[in-house]
Amino acid sequence: MLFKVFPRNELETLYDVLAGHHLVGPQARGKDQADQEIFAFDYIHSFAELRLDFTSTVHSLKRFLLPPREILSSFNLDNSGWEKHIDLGIYKPHVFFGLHPCDINALNKLDKVLTGPVYPDPFYTGKRKNMFIVGVNCSPQPWCFCKSMGTDTVLSGFDMFLTDMGDKYFVEIQSATAYDILMKLPIAQPTEGDHRRFVELMDERNSKFTCQVDNSDLTKILDLEFQSPVWKEWGKKCMSCGTCASVCPTCYCYGVKEYVDLDLTTATKQRQLYSCNLIDFAMVSGGHNFRPDSSSRLKYRYYHKHRGFQEAYEEALCVGCGRCGQACLSGITVPDVIDSVRRQEVPK
Amino acid sequence: MQKTKTYLGVEIKRPRTAFFELSSCEGCQLQILNKEASLLNFLDLLDIVNFREAMSNGSNDYEIAFVEGSVTRADEEERLLKIRRQAKTLVALGSCACFGGVNQLKNRFHDLEWVKKEVYGDHSIETQEVRPLSDFIAVDLSIYGCPIKKEEVEEIVTNLVLGKSIDHPRYPVCMECTANGNICLFNLGEPCLGPITRAGCDAWCPNNRMGCWGCRGPADEANLSQLQEIMDSHGIPRQAMLDRLECFGGFTSAIKKMDE
């Protein structure tokens, strides 16, 4: 990896160079009841809107890669048959400016499923190959457990990665495009002092993680505790609303449905992101529902993320961003659920 | 206008359709006439033979009847039974028809004579307890909402005409609200019935920063007791939640169950 530094006040130059493209980044969206700022990923139209000092966003950046609804194909219908059109929507390259390590790691996990060699998803892959990512280091929040998931740092899946060092930015360069772009800034080789400052900053950041999950032997423990009464307790709290999956940066389950337009001459096939917590997620033809109660649905959500995926890919399908727990009105968090399975006790 | 249309070369008959109203604001029928950009295509799917709000000279020879409103008088009950005898498919249109709607708020009072006196004074008028259509007849299809969402009606009517299955979302409004990237209204201090109310409206109210009032009734899984705890933890008074639950009548039996 190549490392460079550039003066802090040159960040706007970097923005200006990239702003010719569709640029998505963190921006403020108002304040909550506790007077804390709420952030969201959205299109940025001026440098002032870009808030690299953001805590974390309520929603992940999934809607730019796996939109809640996406037209997979459209059809022109006539008396003799139909004509099918597919638009992958990849003619608009996107710049993502300001992704934390967890969110870049989330994309890397999605890549394993959706750009995989067997059944690549052309809609996701097309967008993924047409993006430029500027990562940025974060300040750990009380709900972040990425360190437990091994996703607090990121080694690939981005073009450049920035760390704020006060008067300058320390930048890790991963792609030739990123290097070419940085050539338009007065970049310099980091000095010995910069190296030390970077290591100090990382140590300081590491010391700020307060939330953790004990993942040791978790796949086995989940197998052993399949019938545990704690799942019933969590099921009572679950609203089956799907919010956890909606805000999750790695949930990718979807359903496909066909819609005929009112004039009966055009139609679309659309996919809709779904959640395993929704009541009809495991409902099959004929109406049988394999998971009719909320406790079994919630349980399988954890089994997919922390057991099934772990066994298939040797990593969990969770980056520890904590969004699901923050968004859950019932306060169901990953650390609490996993802890309760280990201790066989649900917190009141 | 042609009697038939074609879909992939197959002849599709435009069903003879009638619209009726019982006690209601007729706003749902007005919704049927809204959305001008696609109105002509919508009207072209159906052979509308009776629609008092939109046309004169109604016919009583129809296959599909859309009935808006709730039953509040004996003559409405009679009329509803007559419609049922004629219609092959009877559609309950809107919250009043499905659950009683805003009208059923008066059922909260035990003494309906007092209610009558309070509203109408000495004016003599017949009015009874407000009941949804399904209390009297078999309803083949419900279209929820106060008012109904035209986009959803368009999809339902297209599927009805094509003979495709009609599936309402079984999940709650939260799913559509989060899909729209909204900030949860509970975070902003607003009560919201989104977590227990059937989706299909595209989170119409929360999109406009208004908490959901549950006009579409309960989702297939509606965890009321947990929502009560959520409201408590956000400092929202029980009465505020109850006001919303009772407003459109969709949660009447769910409230009874919660009280048990």
Image (cartoon, rainbow, N blue to C red):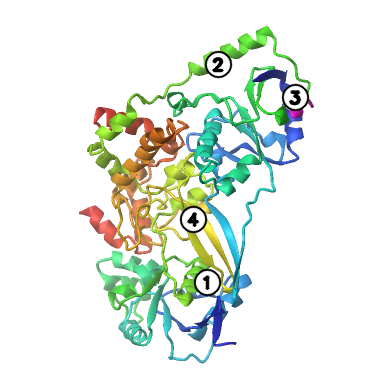
Q: Tell me where residue A101 sits by quadrant.
A: top right
The residue sitting at the front extreme is: A118
Chain of the residue on which disc 4 is drawn: B
Q: Quadrant of the N terminus of chain B?
A: bottom right
Of residue A198 and residue A215, the one placed in the foreground of this image is: A215
Q: Which residues are magenta?
A: A180-184
Mark 3–mark 4 distance (CA, rounded to whole Å): 42 Å
> In percent of the image, x 58 and y 87: which residue is there?
B2
Measured along the vertical axis of the image, is residue B38 above or below residue A235? below
> In percent of the image, x 56 and y 40: which residue is there?
A61
Residues beneath discs 1 and 2 located on the same chain: no
Q: Amino acid at mark 4?
A: Ala
Chain of the residue on which disc 2 is drawn: A
**Residue on which the image places disc 2:** A202
| Magenta span contains residue B96 | no
Q: Nearer the viewer, mark 1 or mark 2?
A: 2
How many C-alpha atoms fall within 10 Å of the one at disc 1: few (<14), some, or many (≥20)? some
Q: Residue A10: which disc?
A: 3
Which percent across, then down, holds residue A248?
Answer: 47, 40
Measured along the vertical axis of the image, is residue A7 above or below residue B53? above
Q: Residue B31: which disc?
A: 1
Q: Amino acid at mark 2?
A: Met
Q: Nearer the viewer, mark 3 or mark 2?
A: 2
Mark 2: secondary structure: helix
Of residue B215 and residue A133, the one placed in the foreground of this image is: A133
**Residue on which the image places disc 4:** B203
Chain of the residue on which disc 1 is drawn: B
